[in-house]
Image: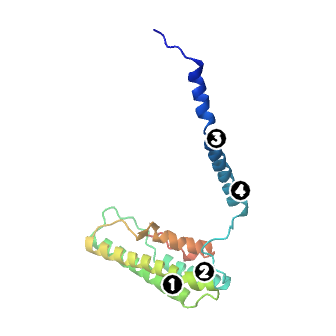
Amino acid sequence: MSATFTPDDTDDERTDERSKPWVRWLFLIGVLGFAAFWIWALFFASKEAVNRIGDRGWAARAEAICVRAEAEREALTDLRTLEQPTPADIAERAGLVDAATDVLERMLDDVVAVEPSDPRGREIVPMWEADYRTWLEDRRRYADELREAGTNLAFYETSIGIPISEKVATFAGDNEMPACAPPTDL
C-alpha cells in the first residue's frame, strides 16, 4: 500500500500557519526591540564611568599620594629567585608583604583624610575605602598564613561576585588614579 495525500491534508497545514500571525508579530517585535536596544546603547547611552566622582582635584591629590607610596613600596622589592625556600625565607617574604601593606595602609589613610567636595564622591569614596581595607586585611591574613605554613602559598582575596581588588582597581581607573589601584605584587 502506498500513502496518498488528499488536498485536505495540505490545506490543514497552511491553515495552521495562517492561523498564528501573532508568532510572526512577536518575532518582528523581538527583532525591532533588539535593534533599538543596540542603537540606544551605541549612540545614545551615557558613556560616563559609573564610579567617576566630580571632584577632579581630589582625584589628582589621591593620585599624587599613590605615586609616592608606589615608589616607597618598590624600594621594598626583593627579586631574588629561591629554588628551595626555607621557612626563614618564607618568613622574610611575609615580613616584606607586611611592610608593603603598611605603605598601602598609610597611603589609603592619606587619600581618605580629605573628603571629596561633590556629593557623588562623598557617597562612593567610603565604599571604595571599605573595599580597599578588606583587601588590605586579606594581605595581612596572607602574611600570617605564610609564617604559619613556612612554605610559599597562593594569595586568595575576598570575592564578592568579582575579586575585591578588581572593584578597587575599577574605581581607581574610572577616576584617573592608576597608582591607587591595588598592586599585583603577591
Q: Secondary structure at mark 1?
A: helix
Q: Residue at x 48, y 71 (%)?
A: 165
**Looking at the image, is mark 3 or mark 4 earlier in the sequence?**
3
- Nearest-to-viewer mark from 2 and 4: 4
Residue hosting label 2: 63
Q: Amino acid at mark 4?
A: Ile
**Hey, which residue is sitting farthest top in the picture?**
1
Which quadrant is the C terminus positioned in?
bottom left
Q: Amino acid at mark 3?
A: Pro
Determine which residue is flagged by label 1. Answer: 108
Q: Residue at x 34, y 76 (%)?
A: 141
Left or right for 108, reference 97: right
The first of marks 1 and 2 along the sequence is 2
Q: Quadrant of the N terminus?
A: top left
Whether pointer 3 and pointer 2 mark residues with C-beta atoms closer than 8 Å, the reply is no
Which residue appears farthest toward the front when viewing the image? 8
- The x and y percentages for residue 75 are 49, 78
* Pair 3/4: label in front: 3
Q: Label 4 belongs to which residue?
A: 39
